[in-house]
Image (cartoon, rainbow, N blue to C red):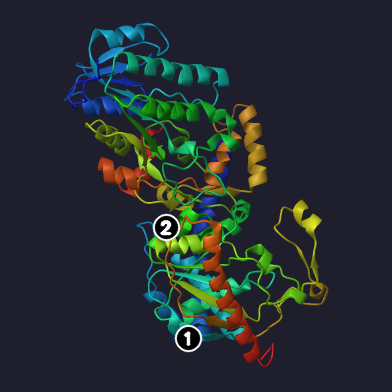
Amino acid sequence: MRAACARGQGTILITGACGRLGKHLVRALHRERRVVAVDRRPFADKPKDVIHERVDLRRKKLRDVFRSEPIEAVVHLGVMHDPRASQAEHHAWNVAGFQKLLEYVTHFQVPKLVVLSSANVYGPQPGNAQFLDEEAPLLASARFSEIRDLIEVDMLAQGFFWKHPDTETVILRPVHILGVVHNAASNFLRLPTIPTLMGFDPMVQVVHELDVVRALEQTLSPGKRGIYNIAGPEPLPISHIIKLLGRPSIPVPYMFGKAALKRLWNLRLSTFPAPELDHIRYVCMVDDRRARDELGYTPKTSIEDTVRSVDLGRW
Amino acid sequence: MASRSLARLGGTLKTVAPFAQRFMNSVTSSVDDWMTAKLGEEFNERLSRVPVNLTSTGVDPFGLDPQWTKYTLATAALLHRHYFRSEVFGAENLPKDRILLVSNHSGQIPIDAVLIGASLFMDVEPPRFIRAMVEKWTQTLPFVSLFFSRVGQVVGVPENARRLLENEQALLVFPEGTRGVSKTFDKRYQLVDFGLGFMRLALETGTPIVPMAVIGGEEQYISIGTFDSLAKLLRMPVLPILPQLALPFGALPLPTRYRIYFGEPMRFAGDPDDDDAVIEEKVFVVKATIESMIHRGLKARKSIFF
């Protein structure tokens, strides 16, 4: 039996639905379509018509979720990136969990799979082209091996894309997502004084969380498949972002900054591992022409609003 | 705790910032006046005519900042007009849209690139900003990487070159690479092997190649050899031995007179993915043209310094 064609109306299963981005997506979708939210965390102020399944992706129970009703699309947002968690935990959750999910997508012939990866899989490198396209190699772990599992998830999804042509697989690689989300980029810009690296001011791209949600919605329409970079408004130097936020910044020499950050990290005073300094040292920007042409994606949030949105999510 | 002390430091910086800002403003306005006096109103008038595609944040997608570029170009133009007193030939040859400038490379430090940039802005109609490709390792250097990015110089990878040419920019390449810039004095004005990348790029993007000869660079620093092992240790591409550094003010290049020749644009057709041998033939045509331009230039030159 071939997988049913994605008509853009059936039930959507969203993993990692209780994250901030997940909640946005659930709210954007639940009025028009049936939404099953899969996350082991609690879902505070959940819309009434959304079904919340508190299951771990690796548990058998996930199978029952797939069996109980036909799923038309799976949106996989449930990728963990907690720099404090161990490698083994990352691997078990991100890679093993995703493999299980892929198994069910094959077995229950789900016609659509959307995976949220990240432009960080390309990695900031001194020899990067100014705008990387989707064919650029994923080199992020060359300088920062702790994020191997994120690259592995992207690769698994790519392998799935080729092996199962009946399922429309979409991989999104958005640049730094800003908003109320708690990720490294947003947390960095929420620091009261923002440290920068002396003599480095690379161009960066940022995208508002709601623009990412819009892009995710666009991938759900029938016929869309492939890998898409998602960039925000226009690229700008980090110093301009800091100026937009109106916050003081301190330039730190790289060698000193790296040593200090390593020490702070070991003392658990910082949430940023030292190799992440490369993001404020080298460019890692993407070319999103393909998403604009094929998905019809355009970021709606201006660069000012995108940058300032991090202050709405203070904790 | 760490963030709190950072915040305190940030607060101090914030109180100092307005004074620093006012000081900077007065400095830049007096520098502007001096610049206009030295280079004439023409400089500002040309600056306003250069086409740039700026985003809403005031830089172009490659990081070019018009303010940084203005002061850099002013410095380059001063060197061009008053220190090296360059003579420019064939400026009327240049097409107005995408071009690939292919030049000989010389001078130990790439002053030739600076002067070509200055002449493309001061002597060519319409004025243009030059885009050159820089080595990857420069991106690892603080301030250097920042500076290159703000004045529109990009990392030397084919994707960047393609994108710039598609935006109708003027791209400068030195197919000799670093081996060309660090020629010793006995090898002056002899071209070393050309890379093939620029020809593939020109074929792929349908860009005319403008052959260039720069005379005068080889005599600014007299190199008698290179320190290969020390260069490797310092992770530099090359380290020349320059006796003149021992003299007072020896670090300054000798004030030779530069002669910059723009040749007739050359158009090539063919498959950019052809075998090396086929591409090499085309490259050889460009190399021979540049070689003869250099010979004619050297013959016409009466004195190195005047």
Say left or right for A15 vs B243. left
Give me the chain letter of mark 1. B
Vertical placement of residue A295 versus B28, above or below: above
Residue at left offset 67%, top offset 93%: B302
**How would you rate the neighbour count of disc 2 (Cα within 10 Å): few for under 14, some for 14-19, many for 20 or more?**
some
CA–CA distance between discs 2 and 1?
34 Å
In this figure, which residue is indicated by the disc labeled 2?
B163
> Element under label 2?
helix
Task: Name the residue nearer the viewer: B89 or A93.
Answer: B89
Q: x, y percentage for residue B86?
A: 58, 85
Task: Name the residue nearer the viewer: A36 or B93.
Answer: B93
In this figure, which residue is indicated by the disc labeled 1?
B40
Residue A57 picture quarter: top left
Give me the chain letter of mark 2. B
Residue A125 picture quarter: top right
- The quarter of the rendered structure image containing the N terminus of chain B is top right
Vertical placement of residue B271 versus B44, above or below: above
Vertical placement of residue B166 versus A296, above or below: below
Q: x, y percentage for residue B29?
A: 48, 74
Three-letter amino acid code of the residue under disc 2: Arg
